[in-house]
Image (cartoon, rainbow, N blue to C red):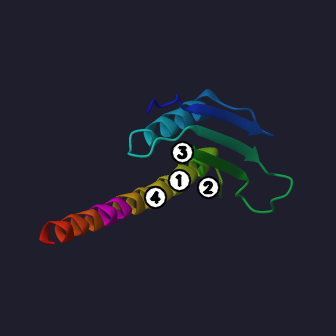
Amino acid sequence: MTEQPLDIKIESRNVGMTPRWKDEIERRVHALESGIIHPTHARVTLTKNAHHKKGADNAEALVVITLPPKRTVTARKESKTFEEAIRAAFHAVDHELDKIEEKRVARAAKVAGKKAEKAEALSVA
């Protein structure tokens, strides 16, 4: 199976995108590729919500990761700064990907165990 290249979309709303934020986002998205799970698409949106927010947390980061075959992982975090919001959103995505990976490993072990039982039953008979 050939892997398709990761498609990354980075956008900002109500705030100008800085090279520092873009570099951090790209670095964190590419770090997600290093695991067993290989994302096919990543979309990150930074939004400044000063109009609707009364508190200090008006920097929002939305991260949407698409996994094969048809699964998405989404995290939306708000914070005082965009750096903190980006960090928190990617931390949440990492946590979800770890859970998905654990489930896949457990499922594979269960299937392997059933195949071994079946082979043993056939060899005894």
| Cα–Cα gap, marks 1 and 4 | 11 Å
Viewer-nearest residue: 8 or 77: 8
Residue 9 on image: x %, y %: 66, 33
Q: Is residue 18 above or below residue 42?
A: above
| Above or below for 32 versus 102 | above
The residue that mark 1 highlights is 93
Mark in front: 1 vs 4:
4
The residue at which mark 3 appears reads as 68
Which element is circle 1 on? helix
Q: CA distance from mark 1 to mark 3?
A: 16 Å
Q: Amino acid at mark 4?
A: Ile
Density class for disc 2 (Cα within 10 Å; few <14, some 14-19, many ≥20) is some
- Residue at (81%, 62%) from the top-left corner? 54
Question: In the image, which residues are magenta?
Answer: 106-112
Name the residue carrying label 2.
Answer: 75
Quadrant in which the C terminus is drawn: bottom left
